[in-house]
Amino acid sequence: MVPHSKLPKIKKGMVAEQIAIQYLLEKGFFVFKNLYGVGPADLIAINEKGKVNIYDVKSESYRKTWKPGTRIPRALTLEQRKLKMQFIFVDKDGTCKVRQR
């Protein structure tokens, strides 16, 4: 397999999304994927009690030049904040972290 960091950006995002889906499934969620790739959300997850979480999946990105190795910060858009969305950050080792920004 090609190392995660060597993948083209679009494929890196596709891999991150699949890892995030697996992560949520393992946490017991029902997961629904954005079918057309348009809109503020990548995934919607519903737990067994009916709580709905809306996610935007991001691959963790690190700077190569200015302050090399530092994580590039991401912020939810105004629309995403209104929807009370969260990020799922997927690191290059496959670790997932859920955060609101």
Image (cartoon, rainbow, N blue to C red):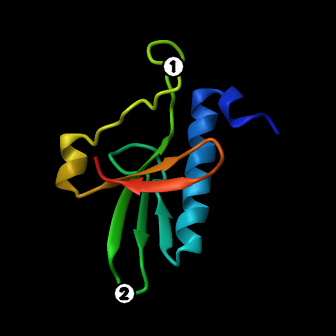
Number of residues whose C-alpha sits closer than 10 Å to that of mark 2, classed few (under 14), some (14–19) or many (20 or more): few
Residue drawn 22% across the image and 56% down it = 83
Q: CA distance from mark 2 to mark 1?
A: 43 Å
Secondary element type, mark 2:
loop
Residue drawn 56% across the image and 39% down it = 13
Answer left or right for 62 relative to 54: right
Residue drawn 63% across the image and 50% down it = 94
List x then y, in percent, for residue 79: 20, 46
List x then y, in percent, for residue 5: 66, 30
List x then y, in percent, for residue 99: 36, 53
Residue 50 placement: quadrant: bottom left
Residue under label 2, please give it. 49
Answer left or right for 49 relative to 96: left
Q: Quadrant of the N terminus?
A: top right
Q: Nearer the viewer, residue 2 or 14?
A: 2
Q: What amino acid type should be assigned to the residue bearing mark 2?
A: Lys
Residue 43 placement: quadrant: bottom left
Residue drawn 51% across the image and 28% down it = 62
The mark that comes first in sequence, 2 or 1, is: 2
Number of residues whose C-alpha sits closer than 10 Å to that of mark 1, classed few (under 14), some (14–19) or many (20 or more): few
